[in-house]
Amino acid sequence: MDDHTQPAAVRARGIVKSFGTGDTQVTVLRGIDLDIYLGEMLLLVGESGGGKTTLLSAIAGILDIDAGDIDVLGVPLSRLPPGKRTVFRGQTMGFIYQQFNLLPALTAAENVAIPLLIQKIGRHEAIQRARAMLDRVGLEDRTEFLPKNLSGGQQQRVAIARALVNEPRLLICDEPTAALDGPNGQKVMALLREVGRSPDRCVVVVTHDSRVFQYGDRMARLTDGRIVGIESIVREGTA
Ligand SMILES: Nc1ncnc2c1ncn2[C@@H]1O[C@H](COP(=O)(O)OP(=O)(O)OP(=O)(O)O)[C@@H](O)[C@H]1O
Ligand SMILES: [Mg+2]
């Protein structure tokens, strides 16, 4: 995977991001350069509070950056006006948030259907596809439950189904297995892996979970606001 012949799906250059002003200002990202290629799963690691979620939000165009450029699938995302950014995100990206961000008044199936409804897919088809996706994360018997009646791990799997239902080309995952036990974590990682294996899709995963490392193609480390090292991950049997 080191010999990247394709253009990067995500090309981030010189990303700077601070929060606050004056004495309380913290600069979290201090010049991030990062490429994510089609057909790969890139893992992003680093200490708590180091800026991993901030970087994912910048790549998704959810957060405005102070300096630098982010291109996604050849589109200059960081230069698009907010409305166009939102439309582009809806068409191309799935995001699994660290906090699951489920809508409390909607059932599991309705939550998963949201990205499809936004794309103007009819309600009946959207709910059918949402139920099929929930089946793939092992929640076929919970499709009509509200989030408050689901366990933490089940809510996380609803959030994962919602990120995958639209078949995004760029899948962004913030600690996707934090609330999952071994078997469910493996099931989810196999699904994410499948996305990363597709030649025209890619996945970036923030994780502290060493069980996840074996699924990645490369691992990038975020330290002191910069990407300090990117290693290829050699898996047994695929080296
Ligand atoms: N909206 C905000 N306003 C002010 N500071 C913020 C904001 N969002 C993040 N920060 C600060 O930016 C720093 C990085 O936060 P971030 O959430 O990106 O870290 P992280 O690497 O994802 O950590 P963790 O592994 O604990 O999730 C933290 O010090 C945090 O306090
Ligand atoms: Mg975080």
Image (spheres, rainbow, N blue to C red):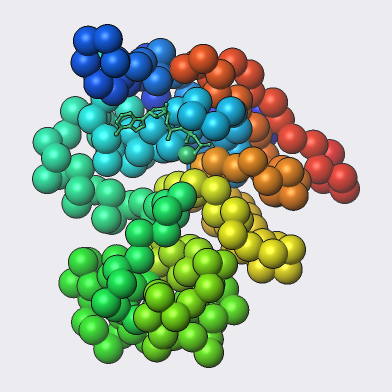
47 is higher (above) or lower (below) than 147: above
Front-most of 222 and 119? 222
* Identity of the residue furthest to the top in this view: 23
* Identity of the residue furthest to the front in this view: 23
Front-most of 14 and 194? 14
Q: Position of residue 49 (x, y in %)?
A: 49, 29
Question: Which residue is located at x 46 percent, y 50 percent?
Answer: 98
Quarter location, residue 186: bottom right
Report whether 128 appears left or right of 197.
left
Question: Which residue is located at x 48 percent, y 69 percent?
Answer: 155
Q: Is residue 204 visible?
A: yes
Report whether 66 appears left or right of 48.
left
Report whether 161 appears left or right of 23.
right
72 is higher (above) or lower (below) than 26: below
Quarter of the figure with the C terminus: top right
Question: Which residue is located at x 39 percent, y 24 percent?
Answer: 12
Q: Position of residue 177 (x, y in %)?
A: 60, 56
Q: Position of residue 162 (x, y in %)?
A: 40, 66
Q: Is residue 194 visible?
A: no
Q: Position of residue 176 (x, y in %)?
A: 55, 54
